[in-house]
Image (tube, grey):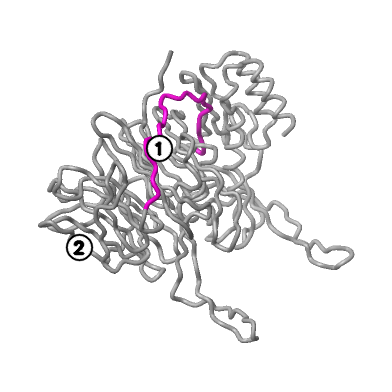
Amino acid sequence: MKLRKALFFLFLMVSPAFADTGTEDVFLAAEEWAADLKGIVVAVDGNTVSIDIGADKKPAVGLVFDLMQGSEDIIHPVTGIVLGKKQKKGGTLTLTKVFELYSDTKFSGETPPNIGDSVVLPLPLPVSLSLSGLSDAEEAVLKNLLSASQVLKEEKKGKGVNTFKISRIEDNLVYSLEAGSAVLFSGNMQTVQYAFVLETLYRKTLSGGRFHSIAYGKVTDEEKKYVVGITDDEIYLLEPDNFTTVKEIDDGFSKLLTVEVADLDRDGISEIFVTQLYRSREIRSLIYRYRDGAFEKADENLPWLFRSVNIGGERHLYVQKIASNGDYAGEIYEFFYDEGEYQPGEPLAGTLGKRLFGFSILKQEDDIFINVAKGSKLSFSTFKGVEYSVPGYFGDTFLTLTVSSSTPSSSPIPTANGASAQAKLEKTIYVVPRIEVLNGELFIIARNELYTRALVNTLVFSDSYLEIYSYRNGIMRKKAASPNGIDPVITDIYAYEENGEKYLLALISNNPMAFRFGESSIVKIKIAPQKTD
């Protein structure tokens, strides 16, 4: 690491224009990718060996793993405790097919594989360099950085050698590691170029308790639009300028999670879509619409978590299920109103098998699917399946939610008086309401920085930020950073355009323990072009 840092600073002296580009991100991305590619053998059928490395770890057909097999016990000479087993290489496994949770490989070697044998990716990984648009000095320093890497090793093209591409596009260096046509990881080193400023127009603490989610739209037969917000048990309509309450809908709700508005039935008035957690373990969502001067329930008991996406200035609605183990099932469907019924269409291509938590869509030549997954990782993928991962940290999740199972655990838990009790299985899921898209290139993300867990299942946050990025031709650039006052925790965001101006609503928890205590505020922000001299 010391050698790499020394070379990094040498690179900055050679090319000072890249002082803010994060050159080391190339090698950090490689290290993170390779660290996940460890597993075990889960099935053996002749020379076909299945391993527990699935699509979420981004392996590629053609990768060759070492099969490591245990032999003698390693025994501590003093305590006599078995510390583990000596392992030796029993052969190689060449990956042939990738599934959601596992992959098939072809075994080659003398010692037959057994279920439970270890699988590792031998490092450093041989790569051939493909460089374009770089100066001679930049190429020399990048090669030195590569030679210091513990993950990648430069070799000539040949069988089993992957391609490591680095090219200049405008003022960015774009990189990718490719195995044939598969992109294993990619990203870009960028110079921050702010194009917008975020001006806080108004902030108000909301009455009615802690709010979970907000949306904005024309939800009545009036010409004006309202902010729609939800607490745990009520829906609120708020004035868009001063956030005073205009109407409350109390229909015996409990555990409301998110709210969205979209005009699916095309009558000029947006419906209100509310995701509700029922009895702490399943989704039973509701749809409300405005008819004859009042809100009526258009549908209920729907097993969907609603999310809206701004596409070309119009809100489209997408839905997703929560699996029985508490994770999202992964498949995403666009939601329609057809022949008097609300129903999902076909699952989106390119999203199957992923555990998606926060997402949106950029309409470009190839539509780009933006996803923030568990672990705060940001990625882009086309619906043809090509994916680009962005190294770096994109904030802790906006909301964690514990789902209780109806099935008790098999192990009794001791109590203070010596008796035992059966505990329900619980699974924490992560709800990231929105990545807000402004147009076919710009999008907004909120970052929340978690710094400690003060109590069991209680998250404590420090700083929160709103950031605007652009994404085009494989390059992501930061275009704006949040103004002062976005503290302590951003719990939802909603962007819209009105009278030619761009605005952003940010829902804020006024307590750093986020979703368990306190009140909420809304901040109205104007997104204005950066003034230049």
Residue at image position (63%, 23%) is 142
Image quadrant occupied by the N terminus: top right
Residue 133 in magenta stretch: no
Q: Is residue 81 visible?
A: yes
Pick the residue in front: 489 or 60.
Answer: 489
Q: CA distance from mark 1 to mark 2?
A: 32 Å
Pick the residue in front: 442 or 503.
Answer: 503
Please give the label number shown on residue 444.
1
- Residue tagged by mark 2? 297
SS for callout 2? strand
The quarter of the displayed image where residue 230 is located: bottom left
The outermost residue toward the right is: 78
Q: Which residues fall within the magenta stretch? A: 184-206
Residue 159 on image: x %, y %? 56, 34
Q: Amino acid at mark 1?
A: Ile
Could you tell me how many numbered marks the image carries?
2
The quarter of the displayed image where residue 126 is located: top right
The quarter of the displayed image where residue 21 is located: top right
